[in-house]
Image (cartoon, rainbow, N blue to C red):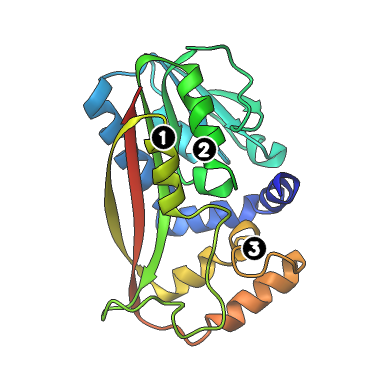
């Protein structure tokens, strides 16, 4: 599973950044998550951006006052990181000493592991007492009448762990608060999201990259207008 995730994201750099340039979605999620985390702990001296991807979220968490580490499983994603210290690694087995950070952020990443409990335990280990953890996980897309976009289709957009599993994992290691962020988005951007190889794998994990993207575009071809994208946020303290 981990090797498949790494390979999928190695192939996703260009499409991932193209989606971000159009929507600014991951930057927005990181900004909102940072604000929620800072509300509980103040400034961050050392923060781990776990599942940093191409460094979009790392850019948000980095400032002149702190040390930011951008950790990701994908070497090709990390090559694009321009801020912080890039480290290739698995957030289920963090290559850091106990208490090395005062904040750990999983911006749109913790749902990509089939064992979020292991990542939550590792986050708790590398945080010093009173440290803060934050995570964001997708709840999906809904029509204006509240119907799930995928309700009448023959596929469901699934991750290795859903938002409920992410929340439960963090609750097992931290005292948490949670909520939902909602964004209006276009049908075209839903298709663009699923044109990212790693995201198309949510629909067709066993197909080749080109095949899964073609099938995802075909599946979503009739989707039209504006829909609502929902993300669950969870913030906890050690």
Gap in angstroms between the C-alphas marked 2 and 3: 22 Å
Label 1, on which residue? 172
Residue at the (50%, 19%) spot, across then down: 125
| In this view, 76 is above or below 45 | below
Choose mark 2 or mark 3, whichever is in front.
Answer: 2
- On residue 68, the disc is none
Among numbered discs 2 and 3, the one appearing first in the sequence: 2
Label 2, on which residue? 117
| In this view, 174 is above or below 232 | above
Q: Report helix, strand or loop for mark 1.
A: loop
Q: Is residue 109 visible?
A: no
Q: Report helix, strand or loop for mark 3.
A: loop
Marks 2 and 1 close (CB-CB < 8 Å):
yes
Q: Report helix, strand or loop for mark 2.
A: helix
Among numbered discs 3 and 1, the one appearing first in the sequence: 1
User: Would residue 31 appear left or right of 70 to someone viewing this image?
Assistant: left
Residue at the (40%, 83%) spot, across then down: 224
User: Would residue 136 appear left or right of 175 to someone viewing this image?
Assistant: right
Label 3, on which residue? 201
């Amino acid at each position: 599973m981990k090797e498949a995730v790494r390979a999928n994201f190695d192939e996703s750099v260009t499409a991932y950044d193209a989606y971000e340039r159009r929507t600014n979605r991951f930057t927005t999620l990181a900004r909102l998550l940072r604000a929620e985390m800072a509300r509980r702990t103040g400034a961050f001296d050392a923060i781990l951006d776990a599942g940093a991807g191409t460094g979009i979220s790392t850019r948000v968490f980095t400032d002149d006052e702190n040390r930011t580490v951008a950790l990701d499983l994908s070497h090709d994603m990390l090559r694009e990181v321009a801020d912080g210290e890039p480290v290739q690694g698995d957030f289920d087995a963090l290559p850091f000493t106990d208490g090395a950070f005062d904040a750990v952020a999983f911006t749109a990443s913790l749902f990509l592991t089939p064992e979020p409990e292991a990542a939550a335990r590792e986050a708790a280990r590398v945080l010093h007492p009173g440290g803060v953890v934050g995570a964001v996980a997708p709840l999906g897309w809904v029509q204006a009448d509240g119907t799930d976009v995928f309700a009448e289709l023959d596929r469901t957009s699934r991750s290795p762990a859903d938002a409920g599993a992410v929340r439960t994992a963090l609750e097992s290691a931290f005292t948490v608060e949670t909520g939902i962020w909602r964004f209006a988005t276009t049908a075209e951007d839903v298709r663009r999201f699923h044109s990212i190889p790693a995201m198309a794998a949510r629909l067709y994990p066993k197909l080749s990259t080109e095949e899964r993207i073609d099938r995802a575009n075909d599946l979503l071809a009739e989707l039209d207008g504006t829909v609502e994208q929902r993300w669950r946020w969870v913030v906890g303290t050690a």
